[in-house]
Image: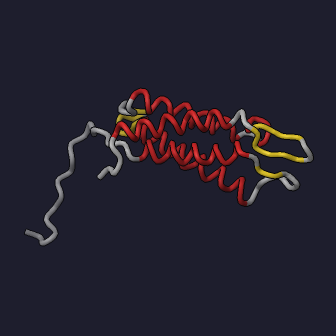
Amino acid sequence: MSTVHPSIGRLLAGSGGLLLIGSLFLPWSATAGNTESGWDAVSVSEVLFLITGICGLAAAISGGRFGFFRRDLSLNAMTDILGVVSGVLIAWLLLFDFPAGASPEVGVYLALAGAVTVATGAGDFRITSWFPRIPESDQAGT
């Protein structure tokens, strides 16, 4: 059962997507007075973060109710997966893989918050399934 109303989930996914995309243009690391934005601080991951932000916006705008390559995989499911993967990558960067001698700046923390917000909003949508529910069997065997 969903704990978030669908309109709140859409708002969370969209705002998280905007925050994630916007954070790529903010400073992520600083070394000796030199700052790097999200586009410069990470090598390939910024493309994943951009795609996650765009999918968060698309899920917010469309409601995430159309299939993505398969009819049973909604845009919300894909966006949720991308948000979780992006959040884990950013957390890993902060905890274990941040460049030596560099200090994290506000952009990387906002990117983490954006990825978590995208995953939370997209993961709690209530999607109307195209497939009928499988009836639950009686546990007592009757």
Q: Nearer the viewer, residue 57 or 5?
A: 5
Q: Nearer the viewer, residue 29 or 87?
A: 29
x and y percentages locating residue 135 in the rendered image: 17, 53
Q: Nearer the viewer, residue 45 or 114?
A: 114
The residue sitting at 72% across, 39% down in the picture is 44
The residue sitting at 78% across, 42% down in the picture is 41
Q: Residue furthest bottom?
A: 140
The scheme the figure's colours follow is: secondary structure
Image quadrant in which you'd find residue 34: top right
x and y percentages locating residue 39 in the rendered image: 75, 35
The residue sitting at 44% across, 43% down in the picture is 121
x and y percentages locating residue 83 in the rendered image: 54, 45
Query: In the picture, which quadrant includes the C terminus?
Result: bottom left
Q: Is residue 80 shown left or right of residue 138? A: right
Q: Is residue 136 above or below residue 48?
A: below
Q: Is residue 32 shown left or right of residue 66? A: right
x and y percentages locating residue 37 in the rendered image: 77, 37
Q: Residue furthest right?
A: 32
Q: Residue furthest left?
A: 142
Q: Is residue 88 shown left or right of residue 79? A: right
Q: How many marks?
A: 0
The residue sitting at 80% across, 45% down in the picture is 29
